[in-house]
Amino acid sequence: MSNMIELVTTKGCNVYLLRYEGEWLIDAGTPGILKKLANLKSLRRIDGIILTHAHFDHMGGAYELQKHFDCPVYVHKLDMPYVTGEYELSFDGVLGKAAKLLEFFSRSKLPEEVRDVSETPLEVLHFPGHTPGSIGIIVERKLVCGDLVRKGKKHLFFGDEVPKLSPPTFCSNYHTYLDSLKKIAKMDFDLLFPGHGGEVSKDEFLDVVSKIPKIQ
Ligand SMILES: [Zn+2]
Ligand SMILES: [Zn+2]
């Protein structure tokens, strides 16, 4: 991997350091994240913390990172009310209830200065459906994509790491989410940097998208 996009921790989610038009942290993981970054000398200055979306495993550490680096937090404007605490995202089903419980126990203070991600000089693409304001950031044919796809064990806890889609339970609108995947499938890129698990090649991505029963 070039050090333009560097994985710095997997606490809560993959947190990447992006060195392009500045230095950015992509996603903020969960509370306690600062301890996981302490030995990274390169992180003396950060221009902003960019959240791919407003799920707690991606924004739980935003407050402490913001305090430490004294920089704004950026998010798509449709996810902004969930980051500022104006609204809460809800989840369905048993999995959703478990996620809510986890969210409760990993609750942290909310970041203070939250700005629209379109104010950054980066190429930000809107891929709604996982949350209303889910985004991807494309830099030199590499797409940092949050939870649009991830890599995980083939079976729940064992097997090879394979690309997986977001379960409907964790999507604000599953149909819209599938449409976003279809949009990404038509894009020109080489590699995806997901919010969980290792990198996903374009071929791997096309393969997993082709197995979706029906996206018209
Ligand atoms: Zn998510
Ligand atoms: Zn996630």
Image: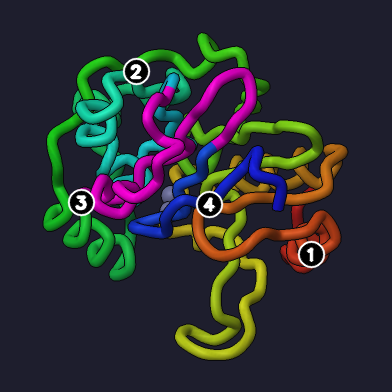
User: Label 3 crowding class (10 Å Cα cut-off): few <14, some 14-19, many 20+?
Assistant: some
| Residue wearing tag 1 | 204
Q: Where residue 69 sits in the image (x, y, percent)?
A: 30, 26
Q: Is residue 164 above or below residue 148?
A: below
Q: Is residue 183 above or below residue 124?
A: below
C-alpha distance separating marks 2 and 1: 34 Å
Looking at the picture, which amino acid does disc 2 mark?
Pro
C-alpha distance separating marks 4 and 2: 21 Å
Task: For ligand 2, tell me if the residue under mark 1 lies within 8 Å.
Answer: no
User: Magenta span has 22?
Assistant: yes
Relative depth, front residue between 179 and 127 = 127
| Residue wearing tag 4 | 7
| Residue wearing tag 2 | 72
Extreme residue in the bottom direction: 158
Relative depth, front residue between 197 and 42 = 42
Indicate which disc, 2 or 3, sits on the residue closer to the N terminus.
3
Indicate which disc, 4 or 2, sits on the residue closer to the N terminus.
4
Q: Is residue 149 above or below residue 26?
A: below
Look at the numbered disc 2 and give the secondary structure of its residue. Answer: loop
Indicate which disc, 4 or 3, sits on the residue closer to the N terminus.
4
**Magenta residues?**
18-46
